[in-house]
Image (tube, grey):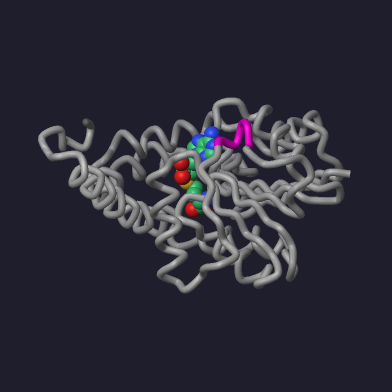
Amino acid sequence: THFGYEQVPVTDKAKRVREVFSSVAAKYDLMNDLMSMGVHRVWKRFAIDLAGVRSGERVLDVAGGTGDLTAAFARAVGASGLAVLSDINAAMLEEGRSRLTDRGIVGNVPAVQANAECLPFADNSFDCITIGFGLRNVTDKDAALRSMLRTLKPGGRLLILEFSKPLHEGFAKLYDQYSFKVLPRLGRFIARDEDSYRYLAESIRMHPDQDTLKSMMELAGFSRVQVYNLTGGVVAVHRGYKL
Ligand code: SAM
């Protein structure tokens, strides 16, 4: 109902919802570029390189959304490997799947609707699991960490790409101004949605900082956890192993 299509017959409605969602997703891409001044591509590339995915491996992209990370993994694992795109949101997953198809990435990329907190995969299934800008939205983060550990093979690695806490005080103040003043305005003008971007800024502030997330991973059972700060700590990549 919140798309305002109550009057439309069901089949058309599904189609309309899908169209609205695609246009929202396109705006969302534009917003990502504007908000991060294009740097989100560099952050994703860093995480992809750090994942070090090789031919024949089995990779799971949790909260994969429109599939930016999944696309890179699907190429890296090749025809003998597997890159699973997963997301809790069916419309998002559908959008991700169609984008992969448009880019000619098919065959080794199944799309699976899945909640990070209780992944529907067998124990010891994946060589590598990633969650990019997704953990922040997960309600029970500890459950998600445990679920990802369970589905990793022994020796497998988890990479978490997420907003974090700026390392330097002066920069942190500027970043705060940007997040709570500039961002909601960008949201209003570009996406006609100020509230979502205010929520984004708040959710980033609430998210556990570098050390806290590292401890949470260790508590969940991950070994050799390392943190890589990007853009002065605006974003961090956490990598840990199941040993
Ligand atoms: N990984 C993509 C990227 O970096 O562009 C998409 C990130 S998007 C900001 C966050 C995604 O997390 C959304 O697609 C949302 O549906 C998904 N999500 C939120 N809660 C989730 C959960 N509990 N389990 C799985 N996915 C979830």
Give the percent coordinates (x, y) of residue 239.
Answer: 75, 48
Where, by quadrant of the figure, is residue 223 drawn? top right
Residue depicted at x 23% and y 32%: 2
Tell me the quadrant of the picture where the C terminus can be found. Answer: top right
Residue depicted at x 21% and y 44%: 11
Residue depicted at x 55% and y 26%: 139
Give the percent coordinates (x, y) of residue 194.
Answer: 28, 38
Left or right of residue 56: residue 64 = left
Residue 205 seen in this snapshot: yes
Task: Look at the picture and state if 7 lies above or below 96.
Answer: above
Which residue in the rendered view is the most extreme toward the left? 7
Camera-nearest residue between 125 and 149:
125
Residue depicted at x 51% and y 43%: 113
Camera-nearest residue between 51 and 81:
81
Residue 204 seen in this snapshot: no
Left or right of residue 25: residue 121 = right
Give the percent coordinates (x, y) of residue 174.
Answer: 47, 44
Would you say the magenta stretch is mainly helix, strand or loop?
A: helix
Tell me the quadrant of the picture where the N terminus can be found. Answer: top left
Segment colored magenta: 115-119
Residue 180 lies in magenta, yes or no? no
Give the percent coordinates (x, y) of residue 42.
Answer: 56, 63
Where, by quadrant of the figure, is residue 50 drawn? bottom right
Camera-nearest residue between 120 and 103:
120
Camera-nearest residue between 201 and 147:
147
